[in-house]
């Protein structure tokens, strides 16, 4: 999310986001290599498969932590509004796509794209929402 | 909500950034409150009242008859 106050909460949130992004990439490589080289199966396969999702869950928790730690109520309200746009946009796209899949057999939507779509809507919302408060 | 922040700030020759620093919020927050686009919470309204040494109702108008 956009960070304009430069306060401690923002710095911590940025650090958690960058660390999470780095871990997603690392864990995705580890998972892909493990499945290719070790031919995993059973419980281990499930555990390795969800490995790249763990930093994403951490990033979502970091969003909650940021909202709790942000002392500037206006910034907090702005970020909540960005997140609502992200949630609303993601729900809209996935719901419409779901019906299209059911009735007109469009290409199956890979759930792995839900998370980036959410952040895409958050990113789109940022300048739009900010412009209202200029 | 209408308010007199801009006037009170001008009386003290404070910029939005000065007021923001005193309130420990961002300059954007001060701007949003000053322009009536964002209503502060009660704790922040009390903080403003203490800072300007005025009752809250002298700073903010509720706009209701």
Image (tube, rainbow, N blue to C red):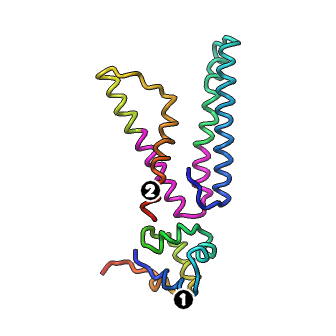
Who is closer to the viewer here, B63 or A127? A127
Say whether residue B62 is left or right of residue B32: left
Q: Is residue A113 above or below residue A87?
A: above
Report the Cα–Cα distance between label 1 and label 2. 31 Å
Say whether residue A75 is left or right of residue A54: left
Q: Quadrant of the N terminus of chain B?
A: bottom left
Judging by the rendered image, the residue that carries numbered circle 2 is A129
| Residue visible at 42% across and 61% down in the picture | A132
Say whether residue B2 is left or right of residue A1: left
| Residue visible at 70% across and 12% down in the picture | A38
Judging by the rendered image, the residue that carries numbered circle 1 is B11
Q: Which residues are magenta?
A: A61-90
Q: Using a 10 Å C-alpha cutoff, classify the residue at mark 1 as few (fewer than 14 neighbours), some (14 to 19) or many (20 or more).
A: few
Name the element at disc 1: helix
In the orientation shown, which residue stands out farthest toward the top? A39
Q: Is residue A71 magenta?
A: yes
Q: Quadrant of residue B2?
A: bottom left
The disc at residue B22 is: none
Residue A125 spot, x, y in % from top left: 45, 50
Residue A11 spot, x, y in % from top left: 67, 54
């Amino acid at each position: 999310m956009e960070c304009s106050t430069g306060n401690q909460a923002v710095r911590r949130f940025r650090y958690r986001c960058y660390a999470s992004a780095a871990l997603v990439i690392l864990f995705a490589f580890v998972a892909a290599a493990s499945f290719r080289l070790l031919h995993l199966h059973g419980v281990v396969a499930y555990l390795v498969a969800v490995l790249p999702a763990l930093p994403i869950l951490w990033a979502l928790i970091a969003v909650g932590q940021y909202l709790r730690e942000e002392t500037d109520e206006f910034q907090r309200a702005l970020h909540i509004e960005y997140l609502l746009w992200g949630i609303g946009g993601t729900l809209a796209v996935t719901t419409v796509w779901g019906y299209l899949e059911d009735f007109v057999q469009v290409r199956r939507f890979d759930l792995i794209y839900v998370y980036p779509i959410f952040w895409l809507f958050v990113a789109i919302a940022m300048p739009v929402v900010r412009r209202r408060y200029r | 909500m209408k308010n007199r922040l801009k006037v009170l700030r001008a009386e003290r020759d404070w910029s939005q950034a000065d007021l923001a620093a005193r309130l420990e919020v961002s300059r954007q927050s001060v701007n949003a409150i000053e322009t009536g686009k964002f209503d502060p919470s009660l704790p922040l309204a009390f903080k403003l009242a203490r800072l300007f040494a005025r009752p809250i109702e002298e700073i903010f108008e509720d706009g209701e008859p």
